[in-house]
Amino acid sequence: MPDPQLESFNAEPAERAEEVLRACNAAPSFAAAVAAGRPYPDADALVARAEEVSRALPWEEVAAALAAHPRIGDRVAGSSAEAAASRQEQSGMGAADAELRAAVVDGNRAYEERFDQVFLVRAAGRSAAEMLAELRRRLENSPEDERAEVTEQLAQITGLRVRGIVTP
């Protein structure tokens, strides 16, 4: 039985579908590339396409998408779809004690000094301690390796967000 949310997404005018997709990934070419693939037969096909497009983005577009992501541990304000998604995804930070939060803040600062960008990690399903461990591990990456990891994390985050728009 076809999913009504997916059917609705497939039937939206292109401009509306792109608007919804931009909340999942702010890279300039992402929304149009994914919307152009409609109709999708199922949510898995849509998610796979969203992840594929994300992984193929040039670095300049990945960097543009990063600008829409808050720091891990920041309290995200606002009522936009992006803000709501970030709050939900970072729920693992909610249980962090003051010491762990301070370590994340310090790690973010070190990461931004090293790579000149916000630390991006798929926070959904990860505890604050796991995110901190990932941040510390990635501080050892070369700039080239880190770009590859950031692109992969963006693809994973995008896939989760896209699934959320078509799955009850």
Image: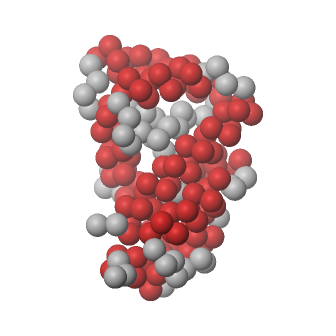
Residue 49 sits in which quadrant? bottom right
Locate residue 156, reporting x and y percent. Answer: 51, 49
Left or right of 139: which side holds 90?
A: left
Which residue does the image show at 44% across and 23% down from the upper left? 132
Toward the top, the furthest residue is 99
Front residue of 139/115: it is 139
Which residue does the image show at 58% across and 70% down from the upper left? 34
Which residue does the image show at 55% across and 43% down from the upper left? 153
Residue 53 sits in which quadrant? bottom right
Front residue of 85/112: it is 85
Which residue does the image show at 50% across and 37% down from the upper left? 121
Front residue of 57/67: it is 57
Q: Is residue 103 visible?
A: yes
In this picture, is 141 found above or below 68? Answer: above
Locate residue 26, reporting x and y percent. Answer: 54, 57
Q: How is the image coloured?
A: secondary structure
In this picture, is 85 found above or below 42? Answer: above
In this picture, is 26 found above or below 18? Answer: above
Q: Quadrant of the C terminus?
A: bottom left
